[in-house]
Amino acid sequence: MKSGEGLMSFGGMKVLSGVQEALVLALMLVFILVLFYVNIDFSYKIFIGVIVFAAIFLSILAATLMAQQREIRRTQG
């Protein structure tokens, strides 16, 4: 398997693997279910949305940084 093959593209850089992408999609699905089908106060739904967005953003950011570090190490060594 070539480097970056089978990974999700993010701004021209391959970032998320299939498992990571599946986990992000599951988290988004859970958020949508909570947003529309759970009978809780709207402020809690907003808080859950912020937490879900932060988790997705941080996972993509961490994967991007790790990919950049790998690329730097590969080009230096």
Image (cartoon, rainbow, N blue to C red):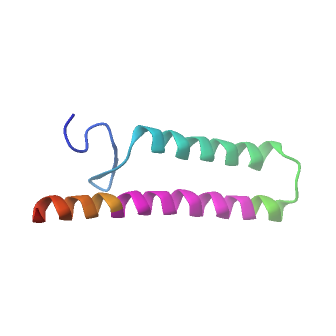
Q: Residue at x 46, y 39 (%)?
A: 19
Residue 39 is left or right of residue 74, and the answer is right
Residue 76 is left or right of residue 20, and the answer is left
Residue 64 is left or right of residue 19, and the answer is left
Q: Dividing the image into 4 quarters, which one contains the N terminus? A: top left
Looking at the picture, tell me which residue is in the foreground, 52 or 67: 67
Q: Dividing the image into 4 quarters, which one contains the C terminus? A: bottom left
Quarter location, residue 49: bottom right
Q: Residue at x 81, y 65 (%)?
A: 43
Q: How many marks?
A: 0
Q: Which region shows up in magenta?
A: 47-65
Dominant SS in magenta = helix
Looking at the picture, tell me which residue is in the foreground, 1 or 45: 1
Relative to 8, does residue 42 appear above or below in the rendering?
A: below
Residue 39 is left or right of residue 47, and the answer is right
Quarter location, residue 71: bottom left
Seen from this angle, which residue lies furthest front? 77
Residue 52 part of the magenta-drawn span: yes
Quarter location, residue 36: top right
Give coordinates of residue 37: x percent, y percent: 81, 42
